[in-house]
Image: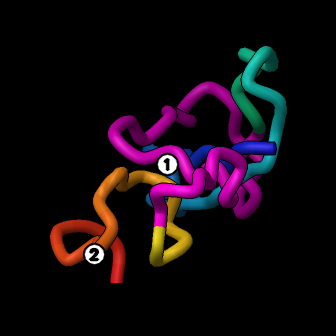
Amino acid sequence: MPKYTYSCNKCEYTFTVTKSMMDETVPDCLKCTSNDNVNRVWGYINLGGMFKGSGSSSGCGTCSSNSCSTCCK
């Protein structure tokens, strides 16, 4: 299951939640329990190796190269 990162604008806490890709609910902040001020941090979704393929030599799952010198280390 993928992990999503959220940030609370009220207390400035950043946290990660594991949930289904179909779940569109916004979680309460794990620090201050606010829900009104929590926003998803876009640009990074950790799929936890869900899509590792045979072309991924480093195990990062995002590269189709055999050397992975330009992505995960």
Q: Residue at x 61, y 44 (%)?
A: 4
Place of residue 28 in the rendered image (x, y in percent of width and height, measured from the top left): 76, 40
In the rendered view of the protein, which quadrant contains the N terminus?
Answer: top right
- The residue that disc 1 covers is 7
Residue on which disc 2 sits: 67
At label 2, which amino acid type do we have?
Answer: Ser
- Which residue is outermost to the bottom? 73
Q: Nearer the viewer, residue 61 or 21?
A: 61
Q: Element at badge 1?
A: strand
Q: In the image, what residue type sits under mark 1?
A: Ser
* Residue 64 position (above or below residue 13): above
Q: Residues within 10 Å of mark 2 (few under 14, many from 20)?
A: few
Residue drawn 29% across the image and 59% down it: 65
Residue 61 lies, in percent from the top left, at: 51, 56
The magenta-colored residue range is 28-56
Seen at 35% across and 51% down, the residue is: 64
Viewer-nearest of labels 2 and 1?
2
Q: CA distance from mark 2 to mark 1?
A: 34 Å
Residue 54: image location, x then y, percent = 57, 56
Mark 2 / mark 1, whichever is N-terminal: 1
- 71 and 66: which one is in front? 66
Residue 34 within the magenta-colored segment of the rendering: yes
**Residue 37 spot, x, y in % from top left:** 53, 33
Q: Is 55 left or right of 72, judged from the image as shown?
A: right
